[in-house]
Amino acid sequence: MKKNEVPQDDANMLEGKFKEPCYALDENGKYTTVGSVGWEAKNIIMQDAWDEVGHRIEKVKQQVINGNLSPIAYYMEKNLMDVKILAAYMGLWRWTVKRHLKMKHFDKLSHVLLAKYAETFDIELTLLKNKELN
C-alpha cells in the first residue's frame, strides 16, 4: 500500500490519540512507516477483545461476591494477569498464589503479604482488606 493509502478510520477506541506505525511505500517506492489511527475491521476486532475482557472481569467479580474466589482473583483479572505473571511479580510460587485465590486462605494472609499484593495491583491496601472491588 502506498503512503497516502494507509487507513485513517478515526472511529476507534483510542479516538485518534495514538497512531500505530504501519509500513507503506513512499513516493520513491521505498518502505517507510506511517502512523495510522486504525481501520474499521481492526477497530471492530479490538472492541470485541476488550468486551471479552470486560465479561471475564465481571464473571470473576461475581465469583468474589459469592465468596468462591478472593479479591486477589478480581484484581489479577482486572490487571490482565494470570497466576504465572502474578507469582513472578510477587516473588511467590504459583501454587502459593493459587492458594491465595481461595477465600479460606485469603482470610489468613498477613498484613505484609496483603500490602505486597496491593502494591502489585497499584491499589489501596484497604480495598483488599475490606474485600472491596472497584
Image (cartoon, rainbow, N blue to C red):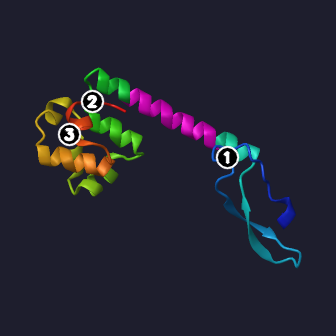
Q: Are marks 2 and 1 in contact (CB under 8 Å)?
A: no
Horizontal side of 124 relative to 12 (left or right) equals left
Q: Is residue 55 magenta?
A: yes
Q: Closest to the observer: 11 or 17?
A: 17
Q: Circle 2 sits in a helix, a strand or a loop, which is it?
A: loop
Task: Measure the C-alpha gap from mark 1 to mark 3.
Answer: 39 Å
Task: Measure the C-alpha gap from mark 2 to mark 3.
Answer: 9 Å
**Disc 1 marks which residue?**
15
**Disc 2 marks which residue?**
69
Residue ranking furthest to the top = 66
Spot occupied by residue 130 in the image (x, y as percentages of width and height): 22, 31
Q: Quadrant of residue 124?
A: top left
Label 1 amino acid? Answer: Glu
Residue 27 in view of the camera = yes
State which region is magenta: 46-60
Label 2 amino acid? Answer: Leu
Q: Earlier in the sequence, mark 1 or mark 3?
A: 1
